[in-house]
Image: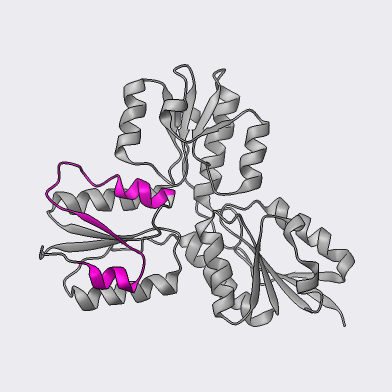
Amino acid sequence: MPKEIVLANPRGFCAGVDRAIDIVEKSLEKFDQPVFVRHQVVHNKKVVEDLEKKGVKFVKEIEEIPDNAVAIFSAHGVSKSVEDEARDRKFMYFDATCPLVTKVHLEVQRHARKGRDIVLIGHKGHPEVIGTLGRHPEDSDTNIYLVENYRDIKELDINLKEIAYVTQTTLSVDDTQDLIKALLEKFPTIIGPSADDICYATQNRQDAVKQLSLECEVVLVIGSNTSSNSNRLKELAEKCGTKSFLIDGKEDIDVEAIKNATSLGITAGASAPEEIVQDVISFLYPLGYQSVRNLSENNETMTFKLPKELLD
């Protein structure tokens, strides 16, 4: 029986990841100083390794960056204290924070100014969540609370009448909607964002995986295990009843697990490069997967501007 590969669309890099990688690469081209990036610029093993080969140094904290360097913040965003530390050091730095994450940061600050307590729906310890929590003004009389699940919401003890919520940008759309419903049941007057905080790319890739799961027996999600949006794609495929595997590349493919599948779906998280998709397709060809089709067209046209100092 002929075997088929079905490719999700859209897949792979989003506008925020494109911008973050461009900031790093253009900094390498434009400046003689060494380029340091605080944390992984995006959560993808190959992207980080490729940039390291070009000379980029990845560090955990600002204090590890020498005075004569160019510093870059990752796409996940940073707290105000990190930005203040960089400004005090007076070295050149660029903020590669995705503009859609910055939107959430501004929402947190606006709600605090208006005297509202804030509930952040997100994953504890994720760099984006740490950065968003760190955008709550230290001198504010309000509080910010992190919730991950229904139990956290049940245990919330908020006395203020004015309450708002924001979310991490890379969560499961369906799961987050359920948590928002639980918040509304407990706090009927809670205020949400005028437009969803979950980014367009996350939503589009999740919608594509739902369709992919209907047509395929197995779904391979290309992305690193540190990538929130890639993990959500794998979980979503499994919720749809389809066996799914998260892989960094062809070397992670369990051939035994897929050998009986006649239809194999492939998608890639928002920080996974297309070249890995093509490598995986080439790897699968000798295994009988010699027919490849796109599930749909990729109609994403979103782009984000680079810092003016890096424009040609």
Residue drawn where x is 67% and y is 81% of the image: 215
Determine whether, in the image, residue 7 is placed left or right of residue 130. right
Q: Nearest the camera: 180 or 200?
A: 180
Residue drawn where x is 22% and y is 58% of the image: 118
Q: Quadrant of residue 284?
A: bottom right
Residue 45 appears in view: yes
Determine whether, in the image, residue 70 is placed left or right of residue 100. right
Image height check: is 308 above or below 289?
Answer: above
Image height check: is 50 above or below 169?
Answer: above
Q: Nearest the camera: 16 or 154?
A: 154
Q: Quadrant of residue 164?
A: bottom left
Residue 232 at x, y = what percent?
52, 66
Determine whether, in the image, residue 243 is placed left or right of residue 104. right
Query: In what quadrant of the picture does the C terminus appear?
Result: top right
Residue 206 at x, y = what percent?
53, 69
Residue 311 appears in view: no
- What count of labels does the image hold? 0
Q: Is residue 239 magenta?
A: no
Q: Is residue 138 magenta?
A: yes
Image height check: is 31 above or below 192?
Answer: above
Residue 76 at x, y = what percent?
44, 47
Query: In what quadrant of the picture does the N terminus appear?
Result: bottom right
Q: How is the image coloured?
A: one colour
Image height check: is 7 above or below 73?
Answer: below
Residue 269 at x, y = what percent?
58, 59
Residue drawn where x is 41% and y is 58% of the image: 169
Q: Which residues are magenta?
A: 127-156
